[in-house]
Every structure is written in structure tokens, then in C-alpha cells.
Image (spheres, rainbow, N blue to C red):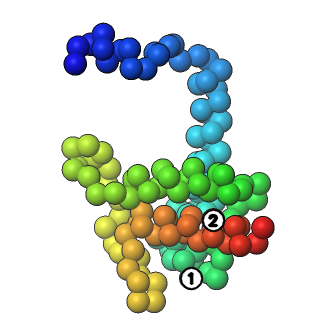
């Protein structure tokens, strides 16, 4: 494949200021949701996993949770360290008989929140 063949596959265009502003708002919302849902410590994650229903921050719905689930699922996948050299707590989170990595716990909390909202609608 030549460069011009690759370029013809997708109609490339400049990224606009409006698109940048919209993405900043979306990322900001997801950041607020993530911090509200997961907290900042493993203890916060344990508390959410022990709860019958995760405590969902106000003003967020299923669509927001699905976006967060998608991102958290991507980050929970194993990858070579040179691809994403981020260090996370290696301390497992143990709830009952289940063991979670930090990202597995986050994915599970979002999954449970979505399940709860879907069942209550």
C-alpha cells in the first residue's frame, strides 16, 4: 500500500477548535465520573465492590458509564510496558473470595453500576 492509497481510505480533515472544546468537556465529565465512582485509593474500590449497588455520582447516566467502561476495559488489558508505561498498584484487591487488579476492580464497579441502572429503568 502506498501513502496516497492509505490517505484515500479516510477523508482526513483538520481538527477544529469546536471539536477540541467538545472533547475537553467529555474528558472532564469522564474524569469526574471516574473519580466519583472509584475514588483515589484501593480502599475506595473495596468499599464500592462490597456495596450491594455502587454509589454512582449524580447527573451521570448509562451512556456516561458505557464510555467509562470502554476506556477502563482498554486500560485493564495486559500490554507490553513499552506501549503504556504506567505503574499502578500491584496490591490485589480482595473482596470475599475474589481477587482483582486495580483496573479489573474499576471495570467491575462500572459494570455493576450499568447493570443496576438498566434493571431500574
Q: Which mark is residue 20?
A: none
Q: Please name whichever residue, 93 or 41, is drawn nearer the observer in this view of the structure.
A: 93
Q: Is residue 21 above or below residue 115?
A: above
Mark closer to the observer (2, 1): 2
Q: Count neighbours of disc 1 (C-alpha within 10 A) and say few if under 14, some if 14 to 19, many if 20 or more.
A: few
Q: Identify the residue under disc 1.
A: 50
State the image coordinates of residue 57 (x, y, percent, origin top left): 70, 61
Quadrant of the rendered structure where residue 101 is? bottom left
Quarter of the image holding residue 92?
A: bottom left
Q: State yes or no: discs 2 and 1 in contact (Cβ < 8 Å).
A: no
Above-or-below relation of 92 to 8 = below
Eyeballing the image, is 81 above or below 117? above
Q: Gap in Å between the C-alphas at discs 2 and 1?
A: 16 Å
- Looking at the figure, which quarter contains the C terminus? bottom right
Residue 11 in the image, given as x and y percentages of width and height: 47, 16
Residue visible at 50% across and 13% down in the picture: 13
Q: Residue at x 21, y 50 (%)?
A: 80
Mark 2 Cα shell of 10 Å, populated few (<14), some (14-19), many (≥20): many
Answer yes or no: is residue 63 visible: yes
Left or right of 119: which side holds 85? Answer: left
- In this view, 112 is above or below 86: below
Q: Residue at x 63, y 70 (%)?
A: 115
Q: Nearer the viewer, residue 3 or 58?
A: 3
Number of numbered discs overlaid on the protein picture: 2
Describe the element under mark 1 as helix, strand or loop: helix
Please, which residue is most extreme toward the top here? 4
**For the N terminus, which image quadrant?**
top left
| Mark identifier at residue 114 | 2
- Please tell me in which quadrant of the rendered image residue 19 appears: top right
Query: Position of 109 compared to 57: left or right?
Result: left
Give the secondary structure at mark 2: helix
Which badge, 2 or 1, is on the more N-terminal residue? 1
Amino acid at each position: 500500500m502506498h501513502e496516497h492509497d492509505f490517505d484515500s481510505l479516510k477523508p482526513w480533515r483538520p481538527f477544529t477548535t469546536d471539536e477540541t472544546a467538545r472533547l475537553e468537556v467529555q474528558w472532564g465529565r469522564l474524569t469526574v465520573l471516574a473519580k466519583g465512582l472509584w475514588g483515589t485509593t484501593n480502599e475506595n474500590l473495596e468499599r464500592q465492590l462490597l456495596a450491594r449497588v455502587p454509589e454512582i455520582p449524580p447527573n451521570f447516566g448509562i451512556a456516561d458509564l458505557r464510555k467509562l467502561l470502554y476506556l477502563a476495559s482498554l486500560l485493564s488489558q495486559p500490554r507490553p510496558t513499552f506501549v503504556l508505561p504506567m505503574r499502578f498498584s500491584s496490591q490485589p484487591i480482595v473482596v470475599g473470595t475474589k481477587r482483582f487488579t486495580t483496573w479489573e476492580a474499576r471495570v467491575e464497579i462500572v459494570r455493576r453500576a450499568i447493570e443496576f441502572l438498566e434493571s431500574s429503568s
